Amino acid sequence: MKPPGGRVFYSTVRCTVSPSSRLSSRRIRRCSVGRESSTCPLPATAQADFSKFTYDELNHAVQRLAQRGIRGGFSPVVDGTILPQHPFEPAAPTAKDVPMLIGTDFNEFTFDISRTMTWPEAEAAVRQRQGERADAFIAAFKKAYPKAEPKEMTYVDTGFRAGAVKQAAAKAAQGGAPAYLYLFTWKPESNALGASHGMELPLMLHNVSLQREMTGASDRAYKFERLISSIWLAFIKTGTPNTKGQPKWEPYNEQTGVTMILDDRCEPRQHHDRELMQMSRSIW
């Protein structure tokens, strides 16, 4: 059975199509573009003409920004020709009838979760980071994850997750093929990576044995591999990630806000972290 339109989208928030360029003139002009013989700063105007610079010059500017810790990069731009309209606009025909599976990992770019913490220690760390928003953040986290360990509050991802929710909502608003949203929380017991960036990939691709240092290659990992790979295969074949023996996975919409928690025991939850997401800014 083929999904509607014969196509499916697997996406993470990492590859969201942006309606406008992420490469702003304000950021680039701070780190001048170097030509071979001279330094050529980009103009300070909001509508800088990037067509006057070569790809190598622009790429060099982005690399300079990255060295300063500024997140940069290039992303698609709606130009009316190559990309005629944003794919998530309600009237856009490009992706309206293509199902989408999108999700993120619990701790994303925190790659060491080995530290132990008490609740007072975790709350102190959050207060230092969140400032005046600390009390609201702590309350929202505990509501979203009532069984979490204290340290998890210090490394829970909100930026990637907020972007994934936003993307799923935009897809659902098209009124076409469904969007399915997940949060990957499975953690290997053999290392401190936790549910970090890309942890679902070797499980999805049935490559646990090739990523032993990442997954641990335990009996538990192999069992979970069978589940996760079956979810992705079901989605590719049918346009829905539902598999036998697992809770029913409903499409995402603004009313129910269903996110499937992917762990040893999968669980669909409805708007479980809404307050936390409302405090968060999407990275993409």
Image (cartoon, rainbow, N blue to C red):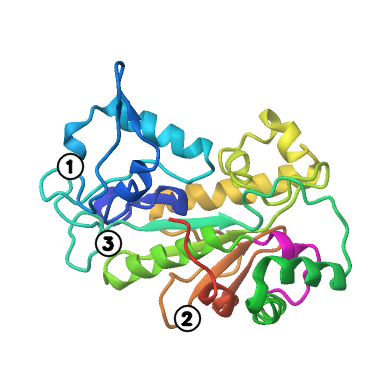
User: Could one spot residue 11 in this view of the protein?
Assistant: yes
Which of discs 2 and 1 lies nearer the camera? The answer is 1
Circle on res. 256:
2
Q: Quadrant of the C terminus?
A: bottom left
- Of 98 and 125, nearer the camera is 125
| Residue labelled with disc 1 | 49
Q: Residue at x 74, y 44 (%)?
A: 221
Circle 1 packing at 10 Å, graded few (<14), some (14-19), many (20+), is few
Q: Position of residue 261 (x, y in %)?
A: 62, 64
Q: Which image quadrant for residue 210?
A: top right
Identify which amino acid the numbered label 3 is placed on. Answer: Phe
Q: Position of residue 158 (x, y in %)?
A: 58, 64
Identify which amino acid the numbered label 1 is placed on. Answer: Asp
Which of discs 3 and 2 lies nearer the camera? The answer is 3
Q: Position of residue 142 (x, y in %)?
A: 72, 78
Identify which amino acid the numbered label 2 is placed on. Answer: Thr
As helix, strand or loop, the secondary structure at mark 2 comes to loop
Query: Magenta residues, as a range?
Result: 144-156
Circle on res. 88:
3
Work out whether 242 lies above or below 132. Answer: above
